[in-house]
Amino acid sequence: MRAASDLVSEERHRAFADGLGKPERVLVVLRDELYGGSWDELVADLEARKQRKPFVFKLNSRIEEDLARIAKLRAYEEEHGVDLAALLSAGSEEGIPL
């Protein structure tokens, strides 16, 4: 039997996951589908793309925004010991709702 504090904690994590916007959800899907669940590999790829010359300002701006989103998502997962992909897909029969 699970403790009440575990249930409250799980509900809080699910609420966080449910509150993620589409850009954050896409990053979680990309991390799992293209980078084997590794934030490090996703960040490394974005950083590599960002370094290409000439810069496309809009793309560069989007990469910076995605890197900030990844930092937030990664920090949440590490701080709470949860997998956002699992939380997002738990509420949907078809996988992570985008």
Image (cartoon, rainbow, N blue to C red):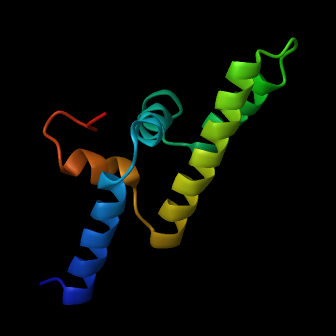
**Picture quarter with the N terminus:** bottom left
Q: Residue 15: percent from the left, percent from the top?
A: 29, 62
Residue 53, compared with residue 9, is above or below; it is above
Question: Looking at this view, is 42 or 76 the one in front?
Answer: 76
Q: In this view, does 29 lie to the left or right of 11?
A: right
Which residue corresponds to the image point at 70% horizontal and 37% vertical from the top-left?
64
Q: Residue 44: percent from the left, percent from the top?
A: 71, 35
Q: In this view, does 82 lie to the left or right of 74?
A: left
Which residue corresponds to the image point at 34% horizontal and 66% vertical from the top-left?
13
Residue 83, compared with residue 45, is above or below; it is below
Residue 90, compared with residue 82, is above or below; it is above
Q: Residue 50: percent from the left, percent from the top?
A: 78, 26
Q: In this view, does 20 lie to the left or right of 10?
A: right
Which residue corresponds to the image point at 57% horizontal and 56% vertical from the top-left?
72
Which of the 4 image quarters holds residue 11?
Answer: bottom left
Q: Residue furthest right?
A: 53
Question: Looking at this view, is 51 or 21 the one in front?
Answer: 21
Q: Residue furthest top?
A: 54
Q: How many marks?
A: 0
Which residue corresponds to the image point at 25% horizontal and 45% vertical from the top-left?
89
